Amino acid sequence: MQRIKNYIDGELIAPHLGDYIENIIPATGEVYSLIPDSDEDDLTLAVYAAEQAQDKWANTSTEQRAKILCDLADLIDANADKLALAEAIDNGKPISLAKDVDIYRSAANIRFFAHAGTQFSSESHAMEDIAINYTLRDPIGIVGCISPWNLPLYLFTWKIAPALAAGNVVIAKPSEITPMTAYLFSKLCIQAGLPAGVLNILHGTGPNIGAPLVSHPKIKAISFTGGTSTGAHIAKSTSGMFKKLSLELGGKNPTVVFADCDFDDMLETVVKAAFSNQGQICLCGSRIYIERPIYEQFKSAFVEKVEEIKIGDPLEKDTQHGALVSEDHMNKILSYIELAKSEGGKILTGGKQVHLEGRCAYGYFVAPTVIENLGNNCRTNQEEIFGPVCTIIPFDTDQQALELANGSQYGLASSIWTNDLKRAHRMAKNIEAGIVWINCWLLRDLRTPFGGTKSSGVGREGGLEALRFFTEPKNVCIKY
Ligand code: NAD
């Protein structure tokens, strides 16, 4: 059985205790590889390696850093088929999605921040004829990057790329549920000539390696993407340590459909917004509010379209809906469907586990599920389910739509469908979310600020925001 290795000081090495966790294929339920169950001693090695590499990498020209990062991006492109296959096996997502979204974006993330690093500049503030201030932005030093399982290599690279481009050295921890592409990526780092110790990748669980990483005194900044409760735990465990924290957390995003929208365009996108990646994207629109005059029309067209989604083996090219990431996660989703029923919800389609034949007979598949007849304040509409489950609710006025959309502890993303320009601007201004899509969803420009409000997080990633996060500003004031 394949044993995944840590990547420390430029080498692939086994965890020092030799402990491993089983890695399961969600589409079949089989164990197919072993993941290092790293601990504090592995972290000590990684921190030492990072310390040795720190000054040299910080003093490497941005151009040279960009060149190495671009070489890495090219290697991702060259290995796209292999990486997409690994992602589909490890995560359960359809291979077409893995290739066109996950792996494509992983290379794009690295290339984007390689270039952004060379374009980064700092501010100066002139004080009439008295003085001039200029701001230096130096790398922070050793930073930690922790990523989740839903977009494994995509979110892993989204964090490490700006950190490295800005001249930091990194200790990164991918999710223990989907470690494979980060492991393959560490081999590409060696191939690209990334200097030893600049990036160190430790595999293992949240408690055994995530928690020590977060609270290590030499790691000065943590960029974390994951669940809100883990984010809260990290904030608590680092309080008093004065670390920089970027926390990208959970979501329960509203999709608001007004009667004047372009119906066909809306329908196609709203289905994707609800069910892409089996609903396991933090940006998925799982609370769908529809203006009452088109509620019935929407309901029947939406259900019909959702029923056309092809559920199947993630490795088949035409599969649109693969397996959920783990048995635990599948059981969580199924328990939420039961909860929805007990809260008075009516299942319009889906609502159950799907048993495929052949290779995937023991996989973790749940049908795309649409529920109506629930109020906004029930648990189904308040808690993040993070799976192929959405609810539909009618509304009558703009004000009511806004109250429903904002009636959540989360504030990550939103998608609004209308052709009324003034209404679009009004909704965009008043909706409590870090990201507002008007007449679209998941249209991403990597230069824009990315992140959430309320319980969806603290801080922003993307473009200059990420480079600012990964640098320490120092103001220099010179009197004339
Ligand atoms: P999770 O919080 O369980 O785990 C995320 C990562 O944190 C994993 O690598 C895990 O091992 C690690 N971890 C767990 N406990 C830790 C601890 N005490 N200290 C340090 N690290 C720890 O989340 P998940 O289940 O992997 O991912 C799903 C969640 O991520 C959902 O809530 C989803 O909304 C969220 N998410 C948010 C965004 C965003 O950009 N806001 C993007 C993707 C996913």
Image (cartoon, grey):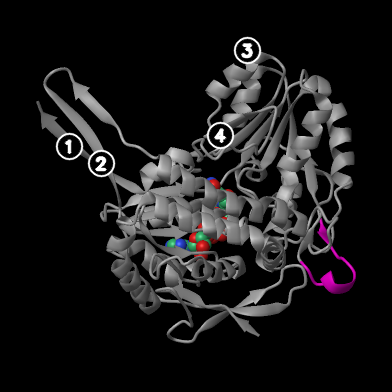
Task: Give the residue drawn at x 50%, y 51%.
Answer: 228
Asked if the residue at label 3 sits under 8 Å from ligand 1, the reply is no
Q: Which residue is mark 4?
A: 435
| Callout in the foreground (4, 1) | 1
Numbered mark located on residue 136 in the image: 2
Three-letter residue code for mark 3: Lys
| Front-lying residue, 468 or 262 | 468
Q: Are marks 3 and 2 in contact (CB under 8 Å)?
A: no
Q: Which residues are magenta?
A: 352-363
Badge 1 crowding class, 10 Å Cα cut-off, few under 14, some 14 to 19, many 20 or more, is few
User: In this view of the protein, can residue 163 be seen by the observer?
Assistant: no
**Distance from label 4 to label 1 (Cα)?**
34 Å
Q: Going 59% across and 53% down the picture, which residue do you hit?
A: 107
Residue 6 x, y percent position in the rendering: 48, 75
Q: Earlier in the sequence, mark 3 or mark 2?
A: 2
Spatial distance from mark 2 to mark 1, Cα to Cα? 7 Å
Q: Secondary structure at mark 3?
A: helix
Looking at marks 4 and 2 on the same chain, the residue that comes earlier in the sequence is marked by 2
Magenta segment includes 344: no
- Residue 98 figure quarter: bottom right
Mark 4 residue element: strand
Is 425 situated above or below 323? above
Type of amino acid under label 1: Val
Q: Label 2: how many residues lie within 10 Å, few (<14), some (14-19) or many (20+)?
A: some
Q: CA distance from mark 3 to mark 4?
A: 18 Å
Task: Locate residue 176, reporting x and y percent.
Answer: 55, 69
